[in-house]
């Protein structure tokens, strides 16, 4: 990584503490005059604190230094807004070493808004990319602002006082404490920037017309009819009033600058109106217009970034905030969202309408709704942080078709899901087959697997349909979480009980046998002929009183975690006047354990039954729906019950040497490619990844000598052909096994030479491995999600059996445990039918080291270990393939807008 690589990166826009947008970029030579003006505008006191003296000559010297030609070890970043420089941060190593001197300056009047902190965060990211490990800074001891800046960064900082000066030393390790501090600052800035969107003091609808059915008019009607209590304007040069709302010819003609402007105009007009809004001081845009071409999209985003406007859309349904003090409904949905405490964010307007309708039918109200549309700016990550901070959202529902920064989203979601359930519809699962790729790893890494890894690690409840999402939301909203997966099924019809039991088993729930004492107790309260196993078949003769008592007894039993009651209407109950549903609702809606009801005659997939205490109980039309919802609740409870995972420290890792190997390879092969066996082994050695002994040979005689050195106790070796681009050796019949003696080695080499000719560049020889379990491990560097670690059953049939699971790197200790225990082959690893377990600590180390390599080396496009031989004594990679591509490192946690 060179300094020029990072300098060539485009500017980044980010948020200050008050939600203001600024541009962070490298200083250019043409910035000299503006930088000098920046310093000269400072007060004498600010200059003295920065330069230890109040000399005006310091301004010119500082501008000279920052704008000088690029030199090794020096970097300068500035912050600007609408062309005005408001901050500068720089570091200098003096040309060598891993320690750099840093300095920060902020314009007068802009302190305490996070300008300096944001600049230093970006400088830290750039320094890490340059291999710098430590910042030092000299300051006057009275310069409390800069000392506080370093103290609050979240990095390890030491101070050394020397008279009136203090020297700060800042370690640049990116640990969880630093990432958490960055997240906290980012969350506060993000929420502040969204205030004009969701809590505006004034709203203007641009493009509201007189024609009934027009989108702009519909939004204006919703705002007015919904009771928005603050200033509301229409912008239409052909009208003075629309729906009783005053209308003006342009945004600039409005009597008050709106916080939020809703744009419902033709696509061609969007960039011009966005520019007008920015110049007028509008803080946020809601663009419902669809069909913007690439040029219009760029112009819209340029206006938003230049003038610091947050943007929802384009191509969206709108937004709403059901706060009773605000009643903001800027949508063109058929009705107003029901007020409540569920946050909803969707990309598809149609999905949004379906979710709002479904929630309303369930009586679940909405706190904030956002249809994100094409999601140019405001994203699901923004919405999670808004709900986390708004003080009343307690359930989050998402429908996201894409992710701008999945790793930042994952960290946010992990935090938010500990406070409230976060549910999503896993959109975009149906990738047609596996994507075309050369290696086993890439073939296994389907879109479904990548997204599911993100959701699982973040604690997000992922569903397959809107119906399933609503069914799960109904249970999580109304019932306590189960302590485990043990379910008791109660039914008044044996066949329905069987269906319910099957549904529970298919969902991963367990139906334990009931304790003998409990069965006696249940027999004493149920009708003759009742079966008190699990399921409990009460028979059709059960009365309302008997069913209620049965459920109460099960609720008090410690051997189960939930009760599923499956009922069918019977003539017996009708004749006696018994209402079996009332047996459940006459008590509290929320008990010690969750209750779910199944009523096969129900005409909707899920509804909520009102209980006597004002609570509700979810009722489902199908046993599968109830079982799925209970399973999701159990998984959430298990996730919440686990301590937060940590990324273990690894010894024997040489990251610097790994970077040197990668850079040397890409210097010769700038387009990237598959590493040759020697370079591959060298890179694996940097991470302590265990490999079977091997040797390289390019001639028949070299192969014989290598085989003699490598032969194990039984004297047998393996020979593998190699040429650049060869991946699936088995398909090419490029492997000879069980070679004994020099003659067989020579014969194998000649076979390769005859069949492959000039294509063959050499052979790899290895001792024949002992018997064991063949596993598979690998990495795919996803362009959006980052490195994905895959694990499962290996060997030549790995793709056919498809017994794989995946997690996003970096892996925590919990992630590694989940990787090992999730595949169907897991029982083989822990000992099965008298066999001994494999070396599980060794397997954990292999996966952690593979994860570390993928995280350290962004150029690693694919890693393919197949097979990995697992025995009780060791875990060893028998065959490894690594592919590199020329990629710049990306800091996924750096604060910047999309």
Image: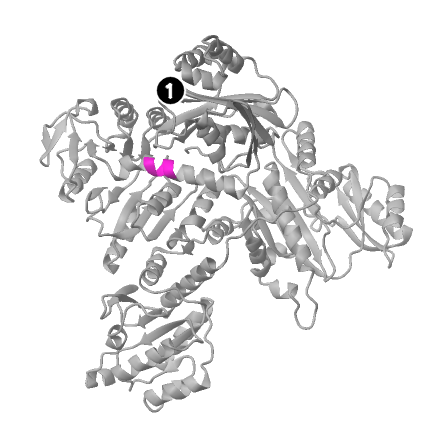
Front-lying residue, 780 or 829: 829
Residue at the location (26% across, 83% down)?
Answer: 545
| Residue 562 inside the magenta-drawn segment | no
Residue at the location (20% across, 86% down)?
Answer: 576
**Magenta segment boundaries in residue numbering:** 188-192
Front-lying residue, 340 or 878: 340
Can residue 313 be seen at all in this image of the molecule? Answer: no
Residue at the location (44% across, 10% down)?
Answer: 33
Q: Main secondary structure of the magenta part?
A: helix
Front-lying residue, 626 or 169: 169
- Asked which quadrant contains residue 841, the reply is bottom right
Q: Please state the horizontal and vertical placement of residue 345, each as a whole percent of the image.
A: 33, 46
Q: Please state the horizontal and vertical placement of residue 638, each as a whole percent of the image.
A: 47, 61
Q: Is residue 351 left or right of residue 231?
A: right
Which residue is outermost to the bottom? 528
Name the residue tied to disc 1: 108
Q: Please state the horizontal and vertical placement of residue 682, each as a whole percent of the image.
A: 73, 40
Quadrant where the C terminus sits is top left
Compared to residue 72, the image places residue 772 above or below, namely below
Q: Secondary structure at mark 1?
A: loop
Q: How is the image coloured?
A: one colour
């Amino acid at each position: 990584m060179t300094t020029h690589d990072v300098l060539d990166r485009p500017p980044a826009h980010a948020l200050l503490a008050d939600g203001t947008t600024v541009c962070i970029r490298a200083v250019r030579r043409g910035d000299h005059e503006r930088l000098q003006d920046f310093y000269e505008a400072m007060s004498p006191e600010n200059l003295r604190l920065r330069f230890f003296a109040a000399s005006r000559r310091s301004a010119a010297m500082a501008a000279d230094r920052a704008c000088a030609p690029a030199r090794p070890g020096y970097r300068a970043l500035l912050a600007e807004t609408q062309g005005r420089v408001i901050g500068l941060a720089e570091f200098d190593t003096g040309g060598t070493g891993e320690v750099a001197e840093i300095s920060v300056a902020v314009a007068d009047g802009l302190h305490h808004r996070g300008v300096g902190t944001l600049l230093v965060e970006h400088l830290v990211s750039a320094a890490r990319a340059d291999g710098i490990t430590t910042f030092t800074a000299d300051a006057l001891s009275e310069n409390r602002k800069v000392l506080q800046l370093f103290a609050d960064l979240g990095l390890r900082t030491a101070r050394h006082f020397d008279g009136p000066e203090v020297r700060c030393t800042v370690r640049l390790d990116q640990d969880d404490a630093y990432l958490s501090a960055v997240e906290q600052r980012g969350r506060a800035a993000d929420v502040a920037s969204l205030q004009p969107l969701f809590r505006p003091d004034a709203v203007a609808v641009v493009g509201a017309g007189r024609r009934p059915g027009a989108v702009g008019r519909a939004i204006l009607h919703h705002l007015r009819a919904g009771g928005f209590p603050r200033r509301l304007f229409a912008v239409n040069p052909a009208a003075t009033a629309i729906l009783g709302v005053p209308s003006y010819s342009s945004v600039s003609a409005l009597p008050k600058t709106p916080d939020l402007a809703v744009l419902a105009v033709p696509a061609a007009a969007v960039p011009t109106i966005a520019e007008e809004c920015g110049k007028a001081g509008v803080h946020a845009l809601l663009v419902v217009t669809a069909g913007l071409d690439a040029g219009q999209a760029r112009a819209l985003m340029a206006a938003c970034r230049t003038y610091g406007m947050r943007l929802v859309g384009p191509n969206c349904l709108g937004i709403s905030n059901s706060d009773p003090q605000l009643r903001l409904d800027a949508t063109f949905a058929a009705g107003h969202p029901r007020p409540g405490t569920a946050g909803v964010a969707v990309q598809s307007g149609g999905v949004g309408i379906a979710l709002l309708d479904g929630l309303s039918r369930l009586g679940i109200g909405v706190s904030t709704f956002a249809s994100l549309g094409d999601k140019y700016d405001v994203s699901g990550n923004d919405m999670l942080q808004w709900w986390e901070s708004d003080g009343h959202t307690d359930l989050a529902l998402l429908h996201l078709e894409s992710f701008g920064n999945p790793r930042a989203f994952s960290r946010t979601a992990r935090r938010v899901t500990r406070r409230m359930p976060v549910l999503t519809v896993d959109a975009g699962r149906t990738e047609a087959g596996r994507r075309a790729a050369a290696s086993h790893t890439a073939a296994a890494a389907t879109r479904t697997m990548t997204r599911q890894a993100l959701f699982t690690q973040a604690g997000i409840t992922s569903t397959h349909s809107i119906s399933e999402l609503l069914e799960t939301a109904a249970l999580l909203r109304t019932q306590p979480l189960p302590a485990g997966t043990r379910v008791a099924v109660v039914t008044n019809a044996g066949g329905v009980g069987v269906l319910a039991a099957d549904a529970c088993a298919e969902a991963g729930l367990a139906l334990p046998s009931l304790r003998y004492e409990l069965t006696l107790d249940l027999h004493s309260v149920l009708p003759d002929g009742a079966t008190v196993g699990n399921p409990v078949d009460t028979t059709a003769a059960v009365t309302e009183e008997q069913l209620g008592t049965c459920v109460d007894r099960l609720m008090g039993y410690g051997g189960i975690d939930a009760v599923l009651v499956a009922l069918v209407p019977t003539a017996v109950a009708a004749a006696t006047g018994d209402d079996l549903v009332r047996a459940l609702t006459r008590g509290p809606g929320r008990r010690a354990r969750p209750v779910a009801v199944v009523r096969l005659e129900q005409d909707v997939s899920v509804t909520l039954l009102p209980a006597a205490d004002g609570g509700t109980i979810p009722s489902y039309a199908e046993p599968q729906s109830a079982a799925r919802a209970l399973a999701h609740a159990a998984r959430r409870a298990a996730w919440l019950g686990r301590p937060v995972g940590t990324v273990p420290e690894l010894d024997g890792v040489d990251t610097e040497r790994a970077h040197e190997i990668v850079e040397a390879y890409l210097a010769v092969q700038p387009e990237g490619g598959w590493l040759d066996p020697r370079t591959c082994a060298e890179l694996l050695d940097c991470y302590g990844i265990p490999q079977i002994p091997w040797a390289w040979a390019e001639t028949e005689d070299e192969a014989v000598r290598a085989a003699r050195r490598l032969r194990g106790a039984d004297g047998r070796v393996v020979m593998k052909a190699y040429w650049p681009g060869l991946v699936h050796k088995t398909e090419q019949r490029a492997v000879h096994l069980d070679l004994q003696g020099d003659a067989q080695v020579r014969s194998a080499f000649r076979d390769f030479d005859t069949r492959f000719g000039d294509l063959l560049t050499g052979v790899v020889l290895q001792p024949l491995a002992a018997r064991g379990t063949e596993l598979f491990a690998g990495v795919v560097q996803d362009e959006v999600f980052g490195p994905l670690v895959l694990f499962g059953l290996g060997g030549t049939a790995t793709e056919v059996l498809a017994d794989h699971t995946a997690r996003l790197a970096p892996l925590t200790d919990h992630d590694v445990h989940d990787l090992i225990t999730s595949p169907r082959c897991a029982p083989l690893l822990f000992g099965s039918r008298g066999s001994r377990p494999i070396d599980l600590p060794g397997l954990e180390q292999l996966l952690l080291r593979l994860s570390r390599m993928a995280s350290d080396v962004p150029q690693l496009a694919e890693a393919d270990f197949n097979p990995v031989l697992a025995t009780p004594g060791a875990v060893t990679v028998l065959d490894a393939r690594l592919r590199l591509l020329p990629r710049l490192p990306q800091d996924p946690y750096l604060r910047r807008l999309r």
